[in-house]
Image: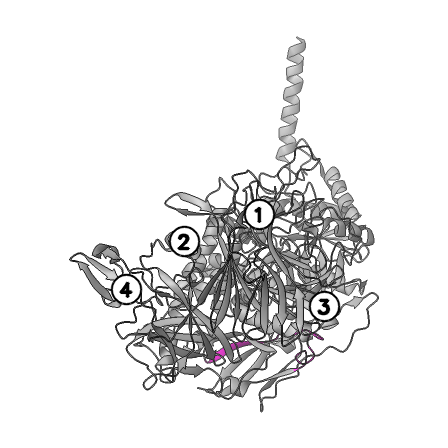
């Protein structure tokens, strides 16, 4: 009976519930809000952060494949946004990565495109940052940062007529001064937001309410290029418990009173508490909540439904005020408060997210990829110039594919080296594909220019710049030249043929440099005919052995002539066997080719090349012209002397024969003499220590050495110094260990040393991951101070174990003093300055006074728990057999009287970035009478000033060109060159008539004057007095002369008359 009564009661309750439910009404959420000046305004900024490759490739992320690694599909994000935004006109969303958006845009119908354009026009959808990717700020060069930003901005301008206002660098691992002033203020941004700053810095800024500052990143420009900047309180995600992807576990707002778990009061209280907590560390009554994170909004309605409810109920509650917002709205609100903001100078490097966790390893991670990116970057600059000289052809090969591949490679999980191995392979593959097409542009352009056909049009040039044999991929410029593989130069000279070498100079000043190309000289022996299948028979001097064999006779008689037929001094330098082993292995790994011809020598000769132009040289058979290098193996002291001195002209280096090491640097011109010691060492990578409260291993991101470094020199004491001497170059070869080989070169006419290193495979058979560093010690009293570049641009003072903005608690005395290097590092005392320049992004430091070190390679065995879930153990594989990565790279060093090193760092640094481009073809004779052998793209009597470089010369079509000119020096960097410079555009474009010159923003998406007019002016606290800021004046349309002040980059769109 009691059970029957209970069941009746239950049925009554259920029936009553059904009746009540049937009376539920639709709730229209009030999201129509503006800013409330009397309350804390919580700006809800819906966003997604879509990595252009990381755990998956860019293609996999876009289409949503390979979800066993990560469930992410950018197509779903963009597809779901459109209906979600249309559902409520007050909803807003920001999007960043143009590499994804442009793909999606190409797939859309006209109807969807028109809808999206309407959303953009109404302000519901806003493009933030606007670059092709969110580039890294440590391992990127400023020219690449500009190019990838421009690629995105131009699309947005053409398709939507918009110019992004806000910098949004929320995920890069530390932030550079160049990002603030150059890729921020000079692009026209009103503010810059980011997430990753040092945990000690963040704690202090929270206490002092200085997470938001006015950042003056340039000492040359001061307040004229400052930008309002904000670091988020924790990261770029929502506050804890406010995540709303379909499968996220944050509590939703359950506002149906007829259902169980009604929680509006609880959720509103939690929202208000989180808002007040953030307001307590933020100036003014405006705070920003970043509502989203990696690859979110794959179901956009899931997020917007909850945010609609929060805005509705929080504003009904009235304690704080919530609204849909964007960083632009937030920035304008901050500006309207008329607050005076603290000033920030220098940068936000290095970054640590907790004790013992310095993100300084990625400055070097994947050094081969970093080197490839830098190589391709310089090549792209030259290829665009040549594309302009020829004229862009809509139907022919273009540099566009390379532009996109290079832009993607600037992503903060690409060139940084923090991606999975298969993703790194994908980046390299894209660069290779883009390079191959750009190579065709270069070949056709040079052929047209040598045939003098650019004025009359060039459709089918007769000269083919490619390698002599057809058994491997055609190549005009030998991308594997660094490992001595260049079939185009390894040709036969005994049949009367010439190797024609066209040397192109992408810099705006005349250049004198040394060319080095491998030439084939085969050792004498009897071999079967079948073994010389890939060797042109007529290319060899043959002597009969028997009916099936021939003797290949060594032929060292080669010579070099310039275009006038004048003999050019040359030198043959033997290629060591260690180098040839590297060549053979990697040509098979990267090209699938096993070389059958072994070059015996490098042929070195000087070349003089006009600005933005080329010179032609001919290599041919000639008796006793090229000097064969004198070889000396120094096993032990000779004639009572323990030293060997090498060097031509002013610069000499002294080595100890006994110790097999460098001991002294002497420059007779500058009177600089300095004791010097160069060595290799490795830091053992820290593994996971389970006894630590928070274990932290060294990995792709993190550099955490396990104790003091170990010297690498003990195993090769018996290996002699090998010295090659000749009239062009002196070389010192050192076998440091079985896996480290070094060549130091001193060239005629140069006053610096070039050091080429081969490092790898790093041995790990002892179970220890290793991080390889090169160090050079001097006696300079540097007082803990050294200087590193910011993205290849400004140099920033660093002080060991010190931070300008907070008192540093030192827990990692090595890793915490490492900084990113793209151009160079130097130190000085009262008499001298010691500089090192690099050929790619690396990490470096000065761990003791007078010493500089570069980390050049890393191989680690454990993951560092930052998301990539893979040990940094790069390998190279052939037929499923893999070995550790070998890296070949270069650095350059020089010692100058104090105050005089800047000129070398800037001028030679630009030459490192823009090496001479070489192209090869065979010819029967000198082409001087019938072809153009010397060419300059500017007036033959003109050269750019020594302190100015052309960093962009790009054909825009329709008779327009994009031109960027960069002043290379900072204020007070050089007595003579840190001054205003002028460039005469009439002479730069001497073969054309300029119709109009329009100065534009750095990313070329708006006129410079308009950008300056719209720029927000921010009040600052305690503004220090600054000297007058120099800027170049307006360009007079009559004389067409451009002025550039120190560190100034000016961008122009120039129209020509037909």
Boundaries of the magenta span: 959-980
SS of the residue at dot 1? Answer: helix
In the rendered image, which quarter contains the C terminus?
Answer: bottom left
Image coords of residue 694 (percent x, y):
69, 37
Residue picked out by circle 3:
226
Q: Position of residue 357 (x, y in %)?
A: 67, 45
Give the Cα separation between the discs numbered 1 and 4.
Answer: 41 Å
| Residue lying at the far right of the rendered structure | 1022
Q: Which mark is residue 714?
A: 1
First in sequence: mark 2 vs mark 4: 4
- Judge whether 143 appears above or below 930 on screen: above
Tag count: 4
Which one is in front in this view, the residue at disc 1 or the one at disc 3? 1
Q: Are marks 2 and 4 in contact (CB under 8 Å)?
A: no
Q: Residue at x 63, y 70 (%)?
A: 666
| One can see residue 438 in this view | yes
- Between the residue at mark 1 and the residue at mark 2, the CA separation in whole angstroms equals 24 Å
Neighbourhood count class around disc 4 (C-alpha, 10 Å): few under 14, some 14–19, many 20 upward:
some
């Amino acid at each position: 009976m009691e059970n029957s009564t209970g069941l009746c009661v239950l049925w009554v309750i259920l029936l009553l519930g059904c009746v009540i439910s049937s009376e539920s009404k639709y709730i229209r959420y009030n999201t129509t809000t503006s800013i409330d000046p009397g309350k804390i305004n919580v700006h809800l900024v819906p966003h997604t952060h879509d990595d252009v490759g990381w755990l998956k490739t860019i293609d996999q992320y876009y289409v949503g494949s390979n979800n066993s690694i990560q469930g992410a599909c950018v197509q779903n994000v963009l597809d779901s946004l459109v209906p979600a935004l249309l559902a409520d006109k007050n909803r807003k969303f920001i999007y960043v990565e143009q590499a994804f958006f442009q793909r999606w845009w190409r797939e859309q119908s006209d109807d969807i495109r028109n809808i999206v354009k309407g959303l953009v026009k109404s302000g519901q959808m806003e493009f933030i940052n606007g670059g092709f990717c969110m580039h890294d700020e440590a391992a990127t060069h400023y020219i690449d940062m500009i190019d990838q930003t421009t690629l995105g901005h131009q699309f947005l301008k053409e398709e939507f007529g918009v110019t992004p206002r806000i910098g949004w660098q929320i995920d890069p691992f530390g932030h550079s001064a160049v990002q603030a002033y150059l890729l921020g203020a000079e692009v026209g941004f009103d503010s810059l937001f980011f997430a990753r700053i040092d945990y000690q810095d963040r704690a202090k800024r929270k206490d002092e309410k200085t997470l938001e500052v006015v950042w003056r990143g340039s000492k040359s420009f001061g307040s004229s290029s400052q930008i309002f900047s904000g670091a988020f309180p924790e990261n770029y995600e929502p506050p804890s418990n406010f995540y709303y992807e379909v499968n996220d576990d944050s509590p939703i707002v359950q506002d149906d009173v007829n259902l169980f778990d009604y929680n509006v009061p609880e959720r509103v209280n939690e929202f208000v508490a989180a808002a007040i907590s953030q307001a307590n560390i933020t100036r003014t009554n405006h705070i920003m909540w970043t509502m989203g994170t990696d690859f979110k909004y794959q179901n956009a309605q899931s997020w917007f439904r909850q945010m609609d409810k929060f805005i509705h109920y929080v504003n009904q509650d009235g304690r704080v005020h919530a609204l849909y917002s964007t960083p632009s709205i937030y920035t304008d609100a901050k500006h309207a408060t008329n607050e005076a903001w603290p000033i920030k100078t220098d940068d936000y490097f290095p970054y640590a997210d907790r004790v013992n966790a310095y993100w300084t390893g990625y400055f070097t991670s994947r050094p081969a990829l970093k080197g490839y990116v830098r190589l391709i970057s310089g090549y792209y600059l030259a290829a665009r110039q040549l594309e302009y000289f020829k004229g862009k052809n809509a139907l022919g090969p273009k540099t566009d594919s390379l532009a996109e591949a290079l832009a993607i490679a600037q992503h903060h999980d690409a060139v940084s080296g923090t991606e999975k191995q298969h993703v790194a392979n994908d980046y390299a593959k894209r660069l290779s594909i883009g390079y191959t097409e750009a190579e065709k542009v270069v070949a056709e352009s040079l052929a047209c220019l040598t045939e003098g056909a650019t004025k009359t049009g060039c459709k089918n040039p007769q000269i083919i710049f490619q390698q002599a044999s057809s058994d491997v991929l055609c190549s005009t410029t030998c991308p594997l030249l660094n490992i001595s593989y260049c079939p185009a130069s390894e040709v036969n000279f005994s049949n009367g043929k010439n190797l024609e070498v066209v040397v192109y100079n992408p810099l705006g000043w005349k250049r004198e440099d040394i060319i080095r190309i491998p030439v084939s000289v085969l050792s004498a022996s009897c071999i079967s005919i079948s073994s010389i299948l890939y060797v042109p028979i007529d290319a060899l001097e043959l002597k009969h052995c028997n009916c099936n064999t021939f003797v290949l006779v060594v032929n060292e008689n080669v010579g070099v002539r310039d275009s006038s037929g004048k003999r050019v001094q040359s030198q043959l330098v033997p290629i060591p066997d260690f180098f040839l082993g590297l060549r053979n292995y990697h040509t098979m790994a990267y090209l699938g080719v096993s070389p059958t011809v072994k070059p015996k020598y490098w042929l070195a000769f000087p070349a003089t090349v006009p600005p933005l132009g080329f010179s032609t040289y001919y290599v041919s058979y000639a008796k006793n012209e090229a000097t064969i290098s004198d070889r000396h193996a120094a096993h032990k002291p000779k004639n009572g002397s323990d030293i060997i001195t090498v060097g031509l002209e002013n610069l000499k280096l002294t080595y100890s024969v006994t110790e097999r090491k460098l001991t002294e640097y002497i420059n007779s011109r500058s009177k600089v003499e300095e004791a010097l010691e160069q060595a290799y060492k490795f830091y053992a990578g820290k593994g996971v220590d389970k006894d630590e409260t928070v274990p932290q291993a060294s990995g792709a991101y993190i550099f955490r050495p396990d104790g003091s470094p170990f010297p690498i020199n003990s195993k090769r004491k018996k290996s002699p110094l090998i010295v090659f001497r000749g009239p062009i170059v002196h070389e010192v070869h050192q076998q440091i260990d079985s896996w480290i080989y070094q060549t130091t070169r001193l060239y005629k006419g140069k006053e610096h040393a070039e050091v080429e290193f081969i490092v790898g495979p790093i041995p790990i058979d002892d179970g220890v991951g290793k991080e390889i560093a090169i160090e050079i010690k001097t006696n300079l009293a540097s007082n803990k101070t050294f200087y590193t570049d910011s993205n290849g641009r400004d140099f920033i003072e660093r002080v060991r174990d010190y931070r300008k903005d907070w008192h540093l608690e030192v827990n990692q005395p090595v890793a915490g003093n490492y900084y990113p290097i793209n151009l160079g590092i130097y130190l000085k005392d009262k008499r001298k300055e010691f500089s090192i320049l690099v050929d790619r992004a690396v990490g470096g430091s000065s761990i003791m006074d007078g010493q500089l070190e570069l980390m050049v390679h890393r191989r680690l065995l454990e993951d560092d728990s930052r998301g990539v879930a893979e040990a940094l153990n790069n390998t190279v594989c052939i037929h499923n057999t893999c070995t550790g990565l070998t890296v070949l790279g270069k650095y350059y060093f020089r010692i100058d009287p104090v105050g005089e090193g800047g000129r070398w760092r800037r001028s030679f640094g630009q030459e490192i970035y823009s090496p001479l481009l070489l192209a090869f073809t065979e010819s029967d004779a000198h082409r001087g009478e019938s072809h153009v052998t010397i060419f300059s793209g500017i007036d033959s009597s003109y050269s750019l000033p020594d302190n100015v470089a052309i960093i962009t010369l790009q054909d825009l079509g329709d008779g327009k060109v994009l031109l960027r000119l960069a002043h290379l020096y900072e204020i007070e960097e050089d007595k003579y060159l840190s001054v205003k410079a002028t460039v005469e555009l009439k002479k730069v474009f001497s073969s054309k008539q300029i119709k109009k010159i329009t100065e534009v923003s750095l990313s070329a998406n708006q006129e410079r004057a308009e950008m300056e007019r719209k720029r927000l002016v921010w009040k600052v606290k305690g503004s220090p007095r600054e000297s007058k800021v120099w800027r170049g004046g307006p360009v007079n349309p009559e004389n067409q002369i451009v002025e550039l002040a120190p560190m100034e980059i000016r961008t122009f769109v120039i129209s020509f008359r037909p």
